[in-house]
Amino acid sequence: MINRTEKLGYTFLSIIFVLSLYLGFSNPQYFDNTFAAEDNTVEYATALMLLCVSLLCFFRLFSIGKGKSFTWKLGVFLFAILFLFGAGEEISWGQRIFNIESGEYFLQNNAQKETNFHNLVVGGKKVNKIVFSQLLMVGMVIYLIFLPILYRKNTWIKKTVDRFAVPVVKWQHTIAFVISTLIVTVIPPDRKWEVYELAFGVIFFLIFLGPLNASVFDRE
């Protein structure tokens, strides 16, 4: 059952995709240089959604964590840090917003000369391609497709996932990711993957707000 918040989230995504498709086909230059450019609409929206997931985790940690187990607190804390890191990386930790110069290390080892880790070049290879693309995609497939199945079928996995407060996706979340992937692949401009990251942020916020195992976030 899709609740009101999820309907709003999916409506927002639909608007973003309609706009992206329209701009992508009618004005690719505007799409790349303005709409999906760095320090603009899509990037800031992505960072905001990732930050919202982090803040939600911190809120749960401090509001209902008192009676929870150590593993529950650890899981919620790690997710809070993970999404905070993602939000910071998305906007290079506010470097361009506050006009902060990159340090010498990032000037020498970052493909875009920015203060972030996902554009670092190590051994001639971009960290973004290895970690933030390939490994992340594998993790996403496991989390979005295999984990929900195993959670429903395997008691040990269910208990372990709940013990560490890992939000389990509902099938509508998985379907939303599949549809998002299909739509993004047909958008012509190169920076279409910025829109995909925004979809990632919105759907993950919906997952964390209303997971299949929502009961693990109830007060004791």
Image (cartoon, helix red, strand yellow):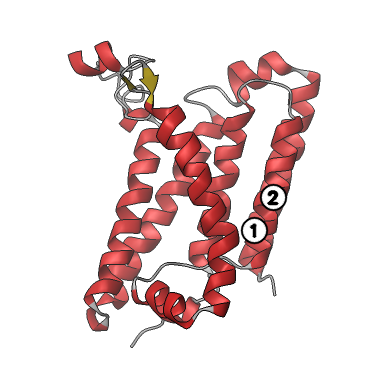
Q: Is residue 4 left or right of residue 217?
A: right
Which image quarter is the N terminus in?
bottom right
Q: Disc 2 residue type?
A: Val
| Relative to 188, residue 20 above or below | below
Q: Are marks 1 and 2 in contact (CB under 8 Å)?
A: yes
Quadrant assignment, res 210: bottom right
- Residue depicted at 74% across the width and 39% down the height: 183
| Relative to 15, residue 20 above or below | above
| Relative to 206, residue 219 above or below | below
- Residue depicted at 28% across the width and 16% down the height: 109
Q: Please give the label number shown on residue 2.
A: none
Q: Residue furthest left?
A: 104
Question: Badge 1: few (under 14), some or many (20 or more) residues near its Cα, within 10 Å?
Answer: some
Question: Badge 2: few (under 14), some or many (20 or more) residues near its Cα, within 10 Å?
Answer: few
Which image quarter is the C terminus in?
bottom left
Q: Is residue 17 left or right of residue 154?
A: right
- Residue corresponding to mark 1: 174
- Residue depicted at 69% across the width and 45% down the height: 180
Q: Position of residue 191 (x, y in %)?
A: 60, 24
Quadrant assignment, res 77: bottom left
Local SS, label 2: helix
Examine the rendering and report whether any part of residue 103 can be seen.
no
Q: Nearer the viewer, residue 189 or 155?
A: 155
- Residue corresponding to mark 2: 178
Q: Is residue 187 left or right of residue 78?
A: right
Gap in angstroms between the C-alphas marked 1 and 2: 6 Å
Local SS, label 1: helix
